[in-house]
Image: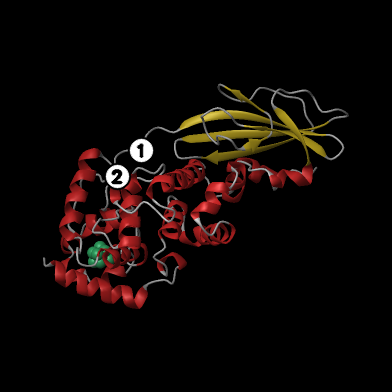
Amino acid sequence: MSNSYIYSRLYAWFESNKRVLPWRETDDPYCIWLSEIILQQTRVAQGMEYYLRFVARWPRVDDLAAADEAEVLREWQGLGYYSRARNLHKAAQMIIEGRKNKGESWFPCTFAELKALPGVGEYTAGAIASFAYNEPYPAMDGNVYRVVARLFDIDEPFDTTAGKKLFHKQIELLLDRANPRLFNASIMEFGALQCTPVLGDNCGVCPLQGVCLSYEHGTADLLPVRKPRAKVKDRWLTYHVYLCEGDTLIRRREAKDIWYHLYEFPCDEHTGEWPKTKGEKAIELTHVLSHQRLHARFIVHRVKELPAIPETIRVAWPELDDHALSRLTLRALETIIP
Ligand code: SF4
């Protein structure tokens, strides 16, 4: 199949179907970097709100670097995968540090410099290098893996080392080196809107149907292939919500486990199921993370005096919102009435 045939059809499709997204309207590497970190593991509709808030609050990398980590985590609240926010903040500080030697407006601009930033992997470095600097690097997100798997009818799992190598080789052959920015934006959008996980009738109106090997072989619905999923670990947690004169106790997680540096109610972890505990009211929630299923029980204790629990802080109930809380805690707060 000819690459130029694919480019002309893909770009015409992109021109008519692309969504208007603020990070596509700029070539400011800071804004593009911010959007790429926010959009990792996040849907565009949800990420948009966070992107606009971050850019409004910290319009330049200097502003983000000068912020307190707790403020950044607070602004990130609800997006999950908080290591992204910590890395974003750390990377902003590294860039400002780098400016001491490289000049006051320096921003990482080569693939290697971008990839050296915390939280920036192969995909993100390729995306920033191509979108901000039009450098010829592919940006293989999940949508692009799917398009490549189907166009070339590749049934190798794309998330193994061997699979990644194979897909990268294929995208390197397909990449439009004269227009990497346009190519990456088009193929990503094509995967998001046209060559979707569930195809429905999309193949019937697809501009690449004539060169799509999986369409020809009738295998499109079976692709891409993933390696078998790792076993999910179950954990049982009891949270204690103490209430005393409108105040409660929270504690910051310090263990490099889940939700590092986020706040939650004091918690006991149990092996196996929850033990019996005294309390006024229990709310039970199941919370699923990528490799863990958390079975959480929140017990409300109305007390005359708050107990002395190490590392907790006392806060007024309305001020809980001033702290970066884990998603599970936020879910519980939808139900707990102080
Ligand atoms: S024909 Fe179907 S599977 Fe092939 S690229 Fe188009 S939408 Fe994807």
- The image shows residue 188 at horizontal and vertical percentages of 32, 62
Give the vertical position of 73 relative to 143 (above or below): above
The number of numbered badges drawn on the structure is: 2
Q: Quadrant of ligand 1?
A: bottom left
Tags 2 and 1 touching, CB below 8 Å: yes
Mark 1 surroundings: few (<14), some (14-19) or many (≥20) residues within 10 A: few
For mark 1, give the secondary structure.
loop
Residue drawn at x 40%, y 52% is: 103
Mark 2 surroundings: few (<14), some (14-19) or many (≥20) residues within 10 A: few
The amino acid pointed to by label 1 is Arg
Query: Ligand 1 near label 2 (Cβ, under 8 Å)?
Result: no
Determine whether, in the image, residue 30 is placed left or right of residue 271.
left
Query: Ligand 1 near label 1 (Cβ, under 8 Å)?
Result: no
Residue drawn at x 56%, y 21% is: 271
- The image shows residue 14 at horizontal and vertical percentages of 31, 73
- The image shows residue 155 at horizontal and vertical percentages of 20, 49
Residue 216 in view: yes
The residue that label 1 is drawn on is 229
- The image shows residue 123 at horizontal and vertical percentages of 32, 50
Front position in the image: 295 or 85: 85
For mark 2, give the secondary structure.
loop
Which numbered dot is residue 226? Answer: 2
The amino acid pointed to by label 2 is Arg
Give the vertical position of 200 relative to 118 (above or below): below
